[in-house]
Image (cartoon, rainbow, N blue to C red):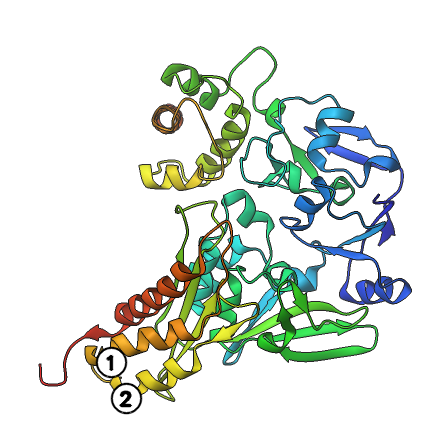
């Protein structure tokens, strides 16, 4: 039974509260946490409600990157300046739940919950996001891919919490696509983010809901390089079938109540091709 | 910063003293079972159905996903605050006129959602309306008449504003 609720007003105070007792549970938007409380799956004795801490509620544009506080909501990501700076993250945020859920749920909560179906995860992975962690011992940065180590498992240390996440501002095309049984209020069957990196003439592909932890389709990223024309923004379609296969091969999906593994493996490839051809129009080298 | 103890909830402009033992409940449970505000409905308890939609610090959320202890010091508005006792708001009247109510269970959540939505977007398109109510499940009327009610409310509100402007 929840016996106490603590409401800190700064990140420093969160550190203090956790160093006194690291079994205290952090509560941000509540969209995952409260379901577990309501269904009696979780019953911590002490809760720290962090969603009013100003440092965690803000984001700022810092040179070539954006630093987003862990308690910034999907709603704030899906529109306004953040949507222009990191469009794929905004697309993903807009597919989360409903307006009510997006008003409450936070990016830090999505990372901390570490569900394979978390919609921020493939985008952050494809962007090479760095997560800033904090505790009374100090701060450290870790890549998202190293922070999430398994299904709903992170490498967060004792007394450590997610302060913010840093992603690059690329000013080039990005796509997020998701398969679900309908357009709203749905948890991903599969999802995928494709980020273009014009400087290195490469793409980053993050896979969602098909692996226990964040996964990039590295072989597909490498393979498709030779088929892309960055001047005309065209793709040689002869590379698409194998590209799709390589993306599917990078997935290790499971059968569950939302889908069977075979459909997940198939659809993740389809999403990759669709995302790629939305950005690069199909044209043969001779044509 | 303080441990939340023996405190108050601000609901619809009224301060309610709450007991320590309620802090770990969902706000929906506290509103209904402790404070007797039965307008917000309890159905899924996981944020899927929207029947418990309320305004928390002017933000639309599901009361079932708010921990009561974390709502201390915040401004809570429920369906009960939509119109004075015995009268109907523009949106409530539009629901009656459009026949957008059958069993009525989803209605309070929809009304709170639409009130908030029209505040932001006075003349929405049908697609915008459908997206705005995507977190409110209705299992009997169907959404056609609900969408129609939003259109009627939107028109009634903009007509009223027009009339007010003419008067100036």
Disc on the earlier residue, 1 or 2: 2
Residue shown at the point (62%, 48%) measured from the top left: A31
Q: Which mark is residue A205?
A: none
Who is closer to the viewer here, A114 or B108? A114
Q: Please, is residue B93 above or below residue A19 in the view?
A: above
Label 1, label 2: how far apart the Cα atoms are: 9 Å
Q: In the displayed structure, does residue A199 sit left or right of residue A129?
A: left
Considering the image in quadrants, where does the C terminus of chain A appear?
bottom left
Task: Tell me if residue A75 comes above or below residue B127 in the rendering.
Answer: below
Quarter of the image holding residue B86? top right
Residue wearing tag 1: A239
From the viewer's perspective, tell me whether residue A220 is left or right of residue A284. Answer: right
Q: Position of residue B106 (x, y in %)?
A: 51, 26
Chain letter for the residue marked with disc 1 in the picture: A
Determine whether the residue tagged by mark 1 lies in a helix, strand or loop.
helix
> Nearest the camera: B42 or A8?
B42
Residue B125 appears in the figure: no
Q: Is residue B108 visible?
A: yes
> Can you tell which of label 1 and label 2 is closer to the viewer?
1
- List the residue tagged with mark 2: A226
Q: Secondary structure at mark 2?
A: helix
The quadrant in which residue B161 appears is: top left
Percent across and percent down for residue A88 are: 42, 66
Work out whether residue B157 or residue A145 is closer to the camera in this orientation and state it: A145
Q: Residues within 10 Å of mark 1 (few under 14, many from 20)?
A: some
**Relative side of A258 to B148, left or right:** right
Placement of the N terminus of chain A among the 4 image quadrants: top right
Q: Residue at x 48, y 20 (%)?
A: B92
Callout 2: residue from which chain? A
* Image marks 1 and 2: residues in contact by CB distance under 8 Å: yes
Question: Which residue is most to the left?
Answer: A287
Q: Is residue A228 left or right of residue A156?
A: left
């Amino acid at each position: 039974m929840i016996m106490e609720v603590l409401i800190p007003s700064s990140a420093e105070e969160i550190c203090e509260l956790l160093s006194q007792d690291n079994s205290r549970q952090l509560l941000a938007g509540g969209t995952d946490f409260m379901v577990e409380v309501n269904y009696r799956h979780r019953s911590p004795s002490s809760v720290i409600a962090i969603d009013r801490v100003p440092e965690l509620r803000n984001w700022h544009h810092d040179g070539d990157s954006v630093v987003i506080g862990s308690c910034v909501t999907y709603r704030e990501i899906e529109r306004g300046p953040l949507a222009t700076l990191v469009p794929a993250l905004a697309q993903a945020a807009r597919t989360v739940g409903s307006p009510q859920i997006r008003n409450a749920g936070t990016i830090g909560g999505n990372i901390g919950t570490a569900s394979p179906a978390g919609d921020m995860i493939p985008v952050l992975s494809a962007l090479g996001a760095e997560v800033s962690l904090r505790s009374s011992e100090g701060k450290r940065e870790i890549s998202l891919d190293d922070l999430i180590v398994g299904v709903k498992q992170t490498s967060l240390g004792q007394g450590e919490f997610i302060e913010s996440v840093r992603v690059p501002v690329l000013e080039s095309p990005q796509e997020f696509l998701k398969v679900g049984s309908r357009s709203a209020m749905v948890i991903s069957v599969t999802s995928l983010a494709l980020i273009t990196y014009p400087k290195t003439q490469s793409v980053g592909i993050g896979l969602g809901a098909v692996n226990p932890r964040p996964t990039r389709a590295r072989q597909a990223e490498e393979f498709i390089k030779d088929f892309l024309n960055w001047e005309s923004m065209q793709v040689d379609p002869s590379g698409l079938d194998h590209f799709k296969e390589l993306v599917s091969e990078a997935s290790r999906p499971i059968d569950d109540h939302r889908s069977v593994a075979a459909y997940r493996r198939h659809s993740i490839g389809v999403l990759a091709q669709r995302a790629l051809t939305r950005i690069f129009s199909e044209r043969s080298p001779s044509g | 910063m303080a441990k939340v103890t023996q405190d108050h909830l601000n609901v619809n402009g009224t301060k309610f003293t709450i007991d320590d033992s309620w802090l770990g409940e969902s706000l929906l449970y506290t509103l209904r079972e402790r404070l007797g505000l039965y307008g917000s409905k309890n159905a899924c308890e996981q944020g899927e159905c929207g029947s418990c939609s309320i305004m928390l610090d002017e933000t639309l959320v599901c009361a079932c996903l708010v921990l009561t202890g974390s709502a201390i010091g915040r401004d809570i508005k429920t369906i009960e605050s939509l119109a004075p006792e015995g009268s109907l708001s523009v949106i409530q009247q539009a629901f009656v006129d459009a026949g957008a109510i059958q069993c009525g269970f989803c209605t309070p959540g929809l009304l709170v959602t639409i009130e908030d939505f029209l505040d932001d977007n006075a003349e929405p398109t049908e697609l915008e309306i459908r997206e705005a109510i995507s977190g409110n499940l209705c299992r009997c009327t169907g959404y056609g008449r609900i969408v129609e009610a939003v259109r009627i409310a939107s028109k009634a509100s903009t007509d009223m504003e027009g009339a007010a402007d003419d008067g100036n």
